[in-house]
Amino acid sequence: MTATGKGGEIGGNGIKKLIFFGSDRSFDLEDLLRASAEVLGKGTFGTAYKAVLEMGTVVAVKRLKDVTISDMEFREKIDKVGQMNHENLVPLRAYYYSREEKLLVYDYMPMGSLSALLHGNKGGGKTPLDWQVRSGIALGTARGIEYLHSQGSNVHGNIKSSNVLLTKSYDARVSDFGLAQLVGPPTSPTRVAGYRAPEVTDPRRVSQKADVYSFGVLLLELLTGKAPTHALLNEEGVDLPRWVQSIVQDQWTSQVFDIELLRYQSVEEEMVQLLQLAIDCSTQYPDHRPSMSAVVERIQELCLSSLRVTQEQSDSVNESD
């Protein structure tokens, strides 16, 4: 990677340096700039890279674009992001700031994003995801957002499936939180139009209820396997809330679900409950949407119910043997 900059953080020996959060400081800016870099994707706030350091450590680096706030304000806001600590968030490990360059360093997530698994990525096919995995991703994502909302007036501001990254065991980690307040209006706002609550006119001014709406659309995406409007570069996508509402009103609920989920008939009730929650979250009126803590509670209940059904099925099979 290459970086330019005057003014960054200067160490005692005059060398610009990364500012770390936490105790893991196993590399410095020079190591990062010498690393081999591969573009992971270009998003609303900048370009993400996979950087392989000489000692073998792999990190994800986001190069921010259109940062419009002052040096002091940037550092204040990014310090808050660095202090966020939850098992369902991708932690910010370090940052570098100069007038020309703003870099954020995160843990690298080798499984990639939920969007890539659901819709395919870089020529790769879709990854079949069963009900247990999808409901677990829904719960983990909800917990991450709930934690953000519990830290004062924080919002995410850019919830979408490409910002939900996954561990090797399919645990969800929410990324890009706290960045909406750092940058100017996106040059292509339609990229996230399908997730954006109807009351949001400025992507930098988003409420917690607008986050709930975006999460509702993400739930619909998980359940239907369809991409929201303008979520993918090559496809127009679907107005998911409107499409789902039209089918549910016609009593064709089973036609909503991704074909991968139709074989899980034993948990159809739980699937319909999650669908109803998604509809509640993506309702037009902000005051009618549940809080994220209520959302987490409802998903936990239906996950437990699914486990009980699966266990009962397993027990009955064993008894018949």
Image (cartoon, rainbow, N blue to C red):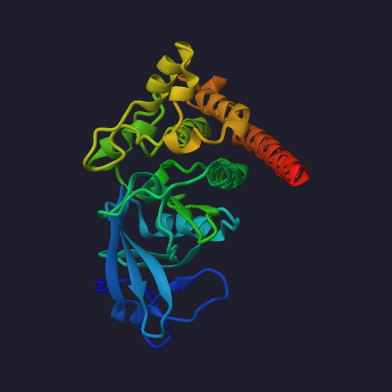
Residue at 31%, 47% in the rendered image: 44
Residue at 43%, 66% in the rendered image: 108
Query: In the displayed image of the protein, which residue is found farthest to the right?
Result: 319
Query: In the displayed image of the protein, which residue is found farthest to the front?
Result: 321
Q: Is residue 48 above or below residue 68?
A: below
Residue at 45%, 11% in the rendered image: 250
Determine which quarter of the picture holds residue 226.
top left
Determine which quarter of the picture holds residue 100.
bottom left
Determine if residue 100 is in view: yes
Residue 55 % position (x, y): 41, 85
Foreground pick, 288 / 299? 299
Q: Is residue 277 above or below residue 149?
A: above
Determine if residue 180 is in view: no
Determine which quarter of the picture holds residue 6.
bottom left
Residue 205 % position (x, y): 41, 35
Residue 42 % position (x, y): 27, 53
Residue at 75%, 42% in the rendered image: 320
